Image: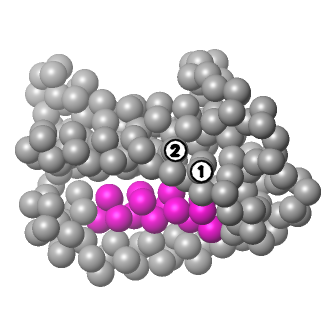
């Protein structure tokens, strides 16, 4: 499935390279502006770049008729939160969940919590904006799907809570958080 995703997204490697370059170049500046560590800023920029790369760059390898799903009004009715059994394999839903986990982790590292909450609210709006863009811009050759929104929001939530849960359980969780924060 991962090979299929990479094959369907021929701009993945250039987009990833540009995202990593932007993260390296701007992490200190963004870190100062947000008052976060350069690592946290790097993770924010890199995760946002990955999201844009995998969701909004044109699918130049695809065929228009294969991605015409955005024109189907049924896309608005296919909403459910992915179940654990669905997440146990590499599929469209698990990849959509995994795409937003790093963004959630990066936001979870931000202090004070009020700033993190503001960024989390903006990040929660991101899947809706992505799917609306995919729906409205047919030349992207992307398929808008509300299920992607549910999966992205689950990934964001998992990322946001990834550090909160272990840090409440003693020294091991706090040590893991120190390693990630730097």
Give the percent coordinates (x, y) of residue 120: 29, 42
Q: Is residue 118 magenta?
A: no
Give the percent coordinates (x, y) of residue 6: 70, 60
Left or right of residue 62: residue 156? left
Res 93 seen here: no
Give the percent coordinates (x, y) of residue 82: 59, 24
Left or right of residue 173: residue 76? right
Q: Residue at x 36, y 38 (%)?
A: 159
- Camera-side residue of 155 and 144: 144
Label 1, label 2: how far apart the Cα atoms are: 6 Å
Mark 1 crowd level (few <14, some 14–19, many ≥20, 10 Å Cα): some
Q: Residue at x 82, y 41 (%)?
A: 72
- Camera-side residue of 109 and 34: 34
> Does 134 sit above or below residue 101?
below
Magenta residues, start to end: 42-57
Q: Is residue 52 magenta?
A: yes
Give the percent coordinates (x, y) of residue 62: 83, 64
Q: Residue at x 56, y 38 (%)?
A: 149
Q: Main secondary structure of the magenta part?
A: helix
Residue with the mark numbered 2: 128
Quarter-of-image position of residue 157: top left
Quarter-of-image position of residue 94: top right
Q: State the count of labels.
A: 2
Residue 179's tag is none
The reply to whether callout 1 and callout 2 are in contact (CB within 8 Å) is yes
Residue with the mark numbered 1: 132
Mark 2 crowd level (few <14, some 14–19, many ≥20, 10 Å Cα): some
């Amino acid at each position: 499935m991962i090979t299929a995703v990479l094959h369907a997204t021929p701009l993945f490697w250039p987009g990833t390279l540009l995202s990593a370059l932007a993260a390296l170049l701007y992490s200190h500046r963004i870190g100062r502006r947000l008052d976060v560590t350069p690592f946290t800023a790097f993770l924010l920029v890199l995760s946002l770049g990955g999201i844009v790369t995998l969701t909004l760059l044109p699918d130049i390898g695809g065929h228009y008729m294969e991605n015409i799903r955005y024109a189907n009004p049924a896309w608005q009715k296919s909403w459910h939160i992915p179940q654990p059994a669905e997440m146990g394999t590499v599929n469209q839903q698990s990849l959509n969940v995994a795409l937003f986990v790093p963004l959630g982790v990066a936001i979870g590292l931000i202090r004070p919590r009020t700033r993190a909450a503001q960024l989390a609210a903006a990040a929660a709006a991101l899947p809706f904006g992505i799917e609306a863009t995919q729906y409205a811009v047919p030349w992207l050759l992307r398929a808008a799907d509300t299920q992607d929104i549910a999966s992205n929001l689950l990934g964001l939530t998992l990322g946001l809570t990834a550090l909160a849960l272990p840090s409440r359980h003693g020294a091991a969780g706090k040590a893991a958080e120190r390693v990630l924060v730097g």
